[in-house]
Image (cartoon, helix red, strand yellow):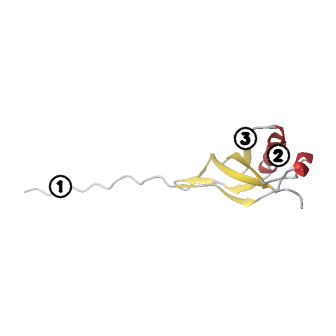
Amino acid sequence: MAKKQQTEAPPVPVLRPAAPIQKIDPAPPPAAKRLTQAITIQVRLTVDPNGDVVDAEALGVKGDVAAQLARAAIDAGRRWKFTPALLSGHPVLSTTTVQFVFRPAR
């Protein structure tokens, strides 16, 4: 009786997500002075293989005040720096979502 030859499964590519190494806080726009409660703006950042943000988009923004806050969040997010995502040990283009919280002035 012949033994079956075992074959190794191909390695599974592992994705290590991009991680921020330099965060920039947004400069609050004039609309932030009118806040009565905290508003969270989510921004999707596209990070290139060098760790630079190459695109930023606010998600689910409604209203004039939120739009002004979103612009400030996008401007700040574009200046963030990341260690790039890795796929099988190689840097790749990736996206990540970050949150910016704007609070009422005290």
Q: Amino acid at mark 2?
A: Leu
Q: Amino acid at mark 3?
A: Glu
**Of residues 4 and 56, which is closer to you in this image?**
56
What distance separates the C-alpha of mark 1 from that of mark 2? 64 Å
Quadrant of image for the C terminus: bottom right
Mark 1 element type:
loop
Q: Residue at x 75, y 38 (%)?
A: 62
Q: Amino acid at mark 1?
A: Lys
Q: Position of residue 13 (x, y in %)?
A: 47, 52
CB under 8 Å between discs 1 and 3: no
Q: Residues within 10 Å of mark 2 (few under 14, many from 20)?
A: many
Q: Residue furthest front?
A: 36
Identify the residue under disc 2.
69
Mark 3 element type:
strand
Residue 106 seen in the current view? yes
Mark 2 element type:
helix
Q: Position of residue 57 (x, y in %)?
A: 72, 41
**Of residues 55 and 70, which is closer to you in this image?**
70
Q: Residue furthest left?
A: 1
Residue 91: numbered disc = none
* Quadrant of residue 65 within the rendered picture: top right
